[in-house]
Amino acid sequence: MRPVAVACLMLVAACAQAGGAPRAAGPAPVPVLPSAEAAPTPTPAVAPHVFVIVMENKSFAEAMAQPFTARLAAENAVATNYHAVAHPSLPNYLALTSGSTYGIRDDGYHALPDSGIGRQLTDAGVPWRAYMEGMTGGCLAGTGSYAVKHDPFAYYAGGCPADVVPMEPQLEADLAADPAHAPRFSWITPDLCHDGHDCTALVADAFLAALVGRITASPAFQAGGLLFVTWDEDDGGAGNQVPLIAAGAGVHPGQSDRAYDHYSLLATLEDLLGVSRLGEAASATPLDELVETAR
């Protein structure tokens, strides 16, 4: 991977949260992705650490117009023909984690079978965590800036396993951990403002810059980790085309116009983590033009 120096400095005044109160965001830290010379592509069949960040409700064009997202894509790998699979949010999150929408076309609560990539990893003895920003009262209590519909792990088996945790302080602790003790798979759901659902794309972009900076500076990422950033769905007017950006070890910098969707990302995650593909991911095209995969 070519050397990367990502710099993003944005001043964000305020954003409207779900409850209407303003939220101020300061300048974003400067994230720096490791160079290929500093962190060579690992040779094992599976990636040691994989991170996924899911943002909200922005078309490919709007998301890519934001300064940090544009720079992250330009310096790494981006799928330019990547699509969400449904509207509204929930079925996309289910597709990303279990390979099925279960026929759901709403954001209501549905107790689903004990399935999904989390269950797979637990059964395989692979440590993982899902970090939910704003979650304070348990994963089924959708209060404040946390939305249950953006937490797919809350639906499988009718409730969250212990691996689903509030984003802070657990993410900070895990990012500081020695790679041998860090989760192999980390899913991150920002809150309703920081994911762009209730706040502007610029506010969400500033948050993403700071979050990516923290991840890419972590020992786990520096030890051959991979990061995927995508959006759950578009704004309803762009054919559900959204960005998918990959950064880290084994990434092929540049653009791919091959047709991919959320099932492609799930297939890639399962290949990288050494578990079988679920549902529609079994026949999906993995993101092999963007990253080296196990298959």
Image: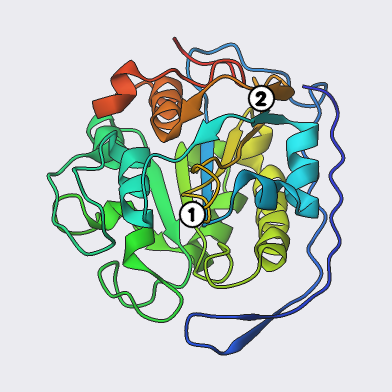
Q: Splitting the image into 4 quarters, where does residue 289 fall?
A: top right
The residue beneath circle 2 is: 249
Q: Secondary structure at mark 1?
A: loop
As rendered, which of 57 and 30 lies closer to the eye?
57
Residue 276 can be seen in this image: no
Name the spot of residue 245 as percent of width and height, x first: 63, 36
Classify 27 as above or below 186: below
Q: Is the residue marked by circle 1 packed among few (<14), some (14-19), or many (20+) residues within 10 Å?
A: few
The residue beneath circle 1 is: 236
Q: Amino acid at mark 2?
A: Ala
Residue at 13% across / 56% down in the picture?
A: 111
Is residue 209 shown left or right of residue 19?
A: right
Q: CA distance from mark 2 to mark 1?
A: 33 Å
Is residue 230 shown left or right of residue 135?
A: right
Which corner quadrant holds the C terminus? top left
Residue at 61% across / 52% down in the picture?
A: 176
Residue at 48% across / 54% down in the picture?
A: 236
Name the spot of residue 251 as percent of width and height, x first: 66, 22
